[in-house]
Amino acid sequence: MSREKIYRLRPDNYQRALQHAGQLLADQFGAGRQALELAVREASKTREQEKKYHALIRDIRLQCFRASSEDAVKAVLVNQFALEMEAQGTPLANPGEMTWDWKNQCSVYVRPSTKKFRKAEASQFMEFLYAEGSELGVHWSEKAQAVYAEYREANQ
């Protein structure tokens, strides 16, 4: 079995997914597999959440940090968010890390990946971005305003 099989479970579909997973496990053991792993974790963020926070990052970059790339601004904002979460006592599930560059003899920081954000972390990141942008004096574009309003409505 070369790829993970991931099921996004909800109260209305988990029984069917469990049956399917059970059959998949039986097939794999029947094919001679000696060990498999089954993990249950909180759902990761959605593609929709990703689109929403990118709209906010884009406005922040265009209005405050035009000389930097969107990737660079995102990296700084993700780092600031991770540090804030850690300071609040709720560090990210997949935090960044320092590693050693043996060739150049220096430390390198690998920022947390937004791809690995849990759904709740992505929501908190949206709140962080909106607050940070507002603090920086960002005048949100219509798209960013609509995205944030939709996000707020969905989370009330």
Image (spheres, rainbow, N blue to C red):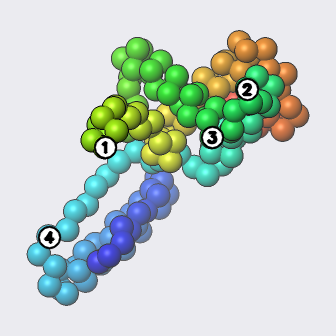
Q: What element carries label 3?
A: helix
User: Which residue has dot 1 on it?
Assistant: 103
Mark 2 vs mark 4: give the one in front.
2
Which residue in the rendered view is the most extreme toward the front?
Answer: 104
Mark 3: amino acid: Asp
Q: How many labels does the image show?
A: 4
| Mark positioned earlier in the residue sequence (3 or 1) | 3
| Mark positioned earlier in the residue sequence (1 or 4) | 4
Circle on res. 71 = 3
> Eyeballing the image, is 44 above or below 6?
above
Residue at image location 14% in from the left, 84% down from the top: 32
Mark 1: amino acid: Lys
Distance CA(mark 3)–CA(mark 2): 11 Å
Horizontal side of 8 relative to 38 (left or right) equals right
- Classify mark 1: residues with Cα within 10 Å, few (<14), some (14-19) or many (20+): few
Distance CA(mark 4)–CA(mark 3): 40 Å
Mark 2: amino acid: Phe
Between 117 and 38, the residue placed more toward the observer is 117
User: Which residue has dot 4 on it?
Assistant: 35
Distance CA(mark 2)–CA(mark 4): 50 Å
Distance CA(mark 1)–CA(mark 2): 32 Å
> Eyeballing the image, is 27 above or below 117?
below
Asked if labels 4 and 2 touch by Cβ distance under 8 angstroms, the answer is: no
Residue 40: where, in percent of width, then height? 31, 52
Asked if labels 2 and 1 touch by Cβ distance under 8 angstroms, the answer is: no
| Mark positioned earlier in the residue sequence (1 or 2) | 2
Residue at image location 88% in from the left, 34% down from the top: 142
User: Which residue has dot 2 on it?
Assistant: 65
